[in-house]
């Protein structure tokens, strides 16, 4: 999730927002507690998994296994936060000097947290060697250094019913042959012409407070040939977010609304709406499959396809939760040792299964039946490996994401595309300039 660049520090009352799985020394800051623990062989891991029973159990399983290992370098304790408050908790704790040794990190946040001196680059050679076996989207990097590593990834896809596509004479897109722009527009027109759906296409427009717009819609922009920022320098968005390709993208998004293909205020649960046949085509995340598996009586009729190739290849969202080491950690050897231990294939498998996400190693992928050859979710592994594009690796990303979300939302609701894209570029460039290009001292 994105973190606003400038935000007042929120006072955190741990008992109100945190589920404390293991309690450390009371009455002092987390950094002081970590320093004290380092002498007794204990470090703390913060996780965003409070409220997610399966993920929490997976984290606990790995920590228990590490703590039972005769080769452990420390005892790891867990403190869990709700995902909705987690990023603010880390930022606030950093400002107060209260960070633990290990923190969960949403992959696109890595550059900002590294620039803000929250994260330390990984240096352990064994851990870095293991990191080479992870899929690229399971690593958080900045300036060619690895700061975080993860166990899984998520991605995006188009979902439809085979029977509907067949009836309308629409080709089922494949990983090798996604729809082109003409096929996409034709499919939308055919779905609309049936009169079966008020808005035949659902793309998640209601989710306008989270990371969804940048995660899901920026790949469409990139497929048109634009981007959120110039990645050669990361100093400007000019020409990328307001060039010819970006204008074509924005006009296409606007046309989805004007032609009645989508609602600019879509449903709150797009996967469940698709199950209930409120849309004929869904653009959603891999997590939609869990809803389909649980509720769709015609599950076997649902097909997952890569997003359309708008001229520069199909592009998919990528990058999910990872784990990193803080700059204030007083036992960095133990922190990195735990991370290395946790990246064993059997634990990657456990973590991926917990949220039914793409396992971060090829060996673990084959160990999870759904993602192994012939599995009903193998297509997501293929989409991710071929088409995933990471969100820009810049500390400015959180500001860029917020600006992009507001801009595209306004354009879909009628704002002039060229004017609004230029305004977005001006705001983004001013943010980068105001931070001296986000060059770390």
Image (spheres, rainbow, N blue to C red):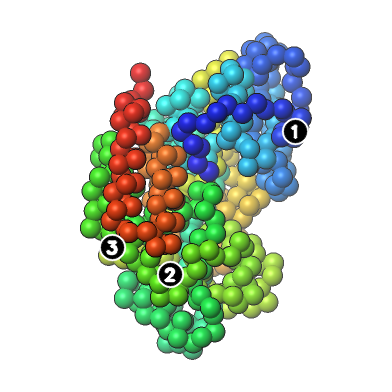
User: Please, what secondary structure does the residue beneath circle 2 have?
Assistant: helix
Q: How many marks?
A: 3
Q: Position of residue 293 (x, y in %)?
A: 66, 67
- Residue 248 image label: 3
- Residue 16 image label: 1
Determine the image quadrant of residue 173.
bottom left
Q: CA distance from mark 3 to mark 2?
A: 15 Å
Query: Which residue: 54% across, 56% down?
Result: 207
Whether residue 306 is situated above or below residue 189 in the rendered picture: above
Whether residue 352 is situated above or below residue 36 in the rendered picture: below
Q: Earlier in the sequence, mark 1 or mark 3?
A: 1
Q: Is residue 57 left or right of residue 160?
A: right
Q: Position of residue 56 (x, y in %)?
A: 70, 42
Q: CA distance from mark 2 to mark 1?
A: 42 Å
User: Please, what secondary structure does the residue beneath circle 1 have?
Assistant: helix
Q: CA distance from mark 1 to mark 3?
A: 47 Å
Q: Residues within 10 Å of mark 2 (few under 14, many from 20)?
A: some
Q: Quadrant of the C terminus?
A: top left
Q: Is residue 226 left or right of residue 402?
A: left
Query: Which residue: 65% across, 26% down?
Result: 11
Q: Earlier in the sequence, mark 2 or mark 1?
A: 1
Determine the image quadrant of residue 346.
top right
Q: Is residue 382 visible?
A: no
Q: Which residue is mark 2?
A: 257
Foreground pick, 125 / 31: 31
User: Please, what secondary structure does the residue beneath circle 3 have?
Assistant: helix
């Amino acid at each position: 999730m994105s973190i606003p660049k400038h935000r007042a520090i929120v006072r955190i009352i741990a008992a109100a927002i945190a589920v404390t799985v293991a309690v450390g020394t009371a009455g002092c800051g987390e950094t002081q507690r970590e320093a004290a623990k380092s002498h007794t062989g204990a470090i703390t891991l913060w996780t965003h998994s409070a409220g997610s029973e399966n993920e929490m159990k997976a984290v606990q399983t790995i920590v228990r296994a590490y703590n039972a290992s005769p080769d452990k370098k420390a005892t790891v304790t867990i403190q869990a936060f709700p995902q909705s408050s987690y990023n603010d908790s880390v930022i606030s704790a950093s400002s107060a000097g209260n960070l633990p040794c290990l923190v969960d990190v949403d992959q696109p946040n890595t550059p900002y947290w590294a620039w803000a001196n929250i994260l330390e680059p990984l240096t352990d050679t064994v851990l870095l060697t293991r990191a080479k076996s992870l899929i690229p989207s399971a690593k958080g990097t900045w300036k060619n250094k690895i700061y975080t590593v993860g166990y899984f990834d998520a991605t995006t896809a188009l979902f439809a019913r085979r029977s509907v596509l067949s009836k309308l004479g629409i080709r089922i897109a494949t990983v090798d042959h996604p729809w082109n722009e003409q096929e996409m527009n034709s499919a939308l027109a055919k779905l609309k012409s049936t009169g079966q759906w008020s808005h035949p296409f659902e793309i998640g427009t209601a989710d306008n407070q989270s990371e969804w717009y940048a995660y899901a819609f920026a790949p469409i922009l990139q497929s048109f040939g634009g981007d959120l920022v110039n990645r050669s320098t990361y100093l400007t968005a000019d020409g990328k977010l307001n060039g010819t390709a970006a204008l074509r993208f924005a006009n296409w998004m606007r046309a989805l609304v004007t032609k009645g293909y989508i609602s600019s205020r879509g449903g709150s649960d797009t996967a469940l709406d698709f199950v209930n046949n409120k849309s004929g085509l869904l653009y959603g995340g891999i997590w939609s499959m869990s809803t389909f598996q649980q509720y769709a009586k015609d599950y076997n009729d649902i097909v997952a396809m890569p997003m359309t190739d708008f001229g520069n290849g199909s592009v998919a969202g990528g990058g999910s939760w990872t784990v990193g080491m803080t700059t204030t950690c007083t036992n960095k050897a133990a922190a990195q040792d735990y991370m290395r231990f946790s990246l064993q294939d059997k634990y990657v498998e456990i973590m991926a299964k917990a949220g039914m996400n793409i396992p971060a190693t090829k060996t673990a992928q084959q160990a999870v039946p759904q993602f192994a050859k012939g599995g009903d979710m193998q297509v997501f592994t293929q989409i991710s490996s071929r088409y995933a594009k990471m969100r820009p690796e810049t500390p400015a990303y959180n500001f860029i994401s917020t600006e992009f979300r507001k801009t595209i939302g306004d354009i879909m609701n009628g704002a002039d595309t060229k004017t609004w894209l230029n305004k977005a570029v001006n705001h983004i460039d001013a943010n980068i300039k105001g931070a001296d290009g986000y060059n770390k001292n």
